Amino acid sequence: MSKNKEQGFSTRNLHADRADKPEHGVLHKPIHTSVAYTYDDARDLAAVFQGKMAGFSYGRQQNPTVNALQARITKMEQGLTSTAFATGMAAIGSTLFALLRAGDHMIASAFLFGNTNSLFNSFRNFGIEVSFVDTTSASAVAAAIQDNTRLVFTETIANPVTQVADLEGIGQLCQQHGLIYLVDNTMTSPWLFQPVSVGASFVVNSLTKTIGGHGNALGGMLTDTGLFDWSSYDNIFDNYRNGDVRLWGTTQVRKKGLRDFGATLGPEAAHHLAIGSETLPLRMDRTCDNAQSLAEFCEKNPAIKQVYYPGLPHHPQHKRATSLFKKYGSIMSIDLADHIDCFDFLNRLQCVVSSSNLGDTRTLAIPVAHTIYYEMGAERRASMGVSDNMIRLSVGIEDIDDLLQDFSQALS
Ligand SMILES: *Cc1c(COP(=O)(O)O)cnc(C)c1O
């Protein structure tokens, strides 16, 4: 293999573990369970703690198995460096906790993963102002910018209604106004889209979903793209204002977020997620193709009022999704006709499983208003376009004919 030629996404990912010559020539990164580390010279231990020497100090901050996964995701996202967390929520919460202060303002998408929405509402109790705006429109984001705005947070494809944010337009705004641009890439994954291409400062992925891909481990990752200029960001504490300026933000997230909050990814979960990540492109291509076929099938079925999927030509952001993403994702939602009871429909499905997760190998279906968006209340649901008879689907890798047949029997 020529050293100079850039390898493809899958090749790089599959061979990532061998880069730092693991013991015994193992092909998979070993699962390192040790919480503590020792050094021949006690001075080295001190140097590691003081950040003067690279090395491991304590399992809450770093672990070799977790580091290997961080390196993989950094490559996938073409970023500078990544920090792993126990879950996607921990990645989001710890990052904002580390970078924002009372009196700051942030702009967030009005169409958010339910728990992220709940978390941002809690931040309000700590003196952080939050504006929820329609991020499909960069001008709506522009109108919300204030003197104390620090950060914009959006997802790529929103769940469950599948709105596609104006990722490019918001990127330009953040650049002009010096705002941190945090993109939750979970719905697209780095296989379909790399937020660094639209100027994101940070990318969040819930590894629990398509990257891990098998519904058997929780994890979250924050990737720093290296694009944000931290030298003019007041919230960086003095003791983190040294060394490579591109790393100041990540350093503060690792100290104040990961170390102090302690939502650390465990080595066993990191191992599951790393194995899962090896087949991300294969699984994602298949789930996207299945979702497209299922969306087209549902469109023609009179028992379904409305289909939400960015791959359909009438989707409001179909053109944007086509220009930004490799494919249209594995999430779609449907509004059942009024005469169909959503629970009866779910009970009639035989292959498709009623469950909340996303990005599993199996196709999962959930009645949105009655479960994941229940706590939000009817008013907020209505503002987000979530009807009482909406079913969200996370399409899996089954044989498409079996999925179509299951839908057609459950709808008839
Ligand atoms: C699931 C999800 C999260 C949270 O991830 P967890 O690993 O479940 O904590 C965040 N954002 C999006 C878009 C998600 O789908």
Image (cartoon, grey):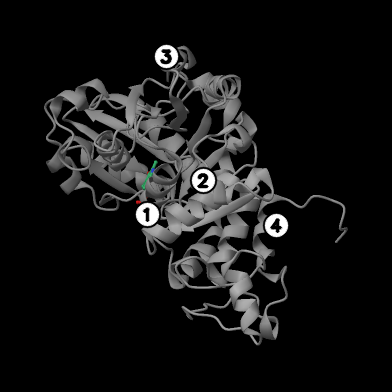
Question: For numbered disc 4, what is the local secondary structure?
Answer: helix
Task: Report, in whole angstroms, how far the alpha carbon at label 1 lies from the one at label 4.
Answer: 27 Å
Mark 2: which secondary structure?
Answer: loop
- Residue 163 position by quadrant: top left
Query: Distance between the Cα atoms at labels 2 and 4?
Result: 36 Å
Q: Are marks 2 and 4 in contact (CB under 8 Å)?
A: no
Disc 1 C-beta below 8 A from ligand 1: no
* Quadrant for the N terminus in the image: bottom right
| Residue with the mark numbered 2 | 237
Q: CA distance from mark 4 to mark 3?
A: 39 Å
Report the residue marked by disc 3. 140
| Amino acid type for the residue under numbered disc 4 | Arg
Q: Is residue 393 above or below residue 44?
A: above
Q: Is residue 323 left or right of residue 284?
A: right
Can you tell which quarter of the image residue 96 is in? Answer: top left
Q: Residue at x 44, y 72 (%)?
A: 268
The disc, 2 or 3, on the residue closer to the chain's N-terminal end is: 3
The mark nearer the N terminus, 2 or 4, is 4
**Camera-side mark, 1 or 4:** 4
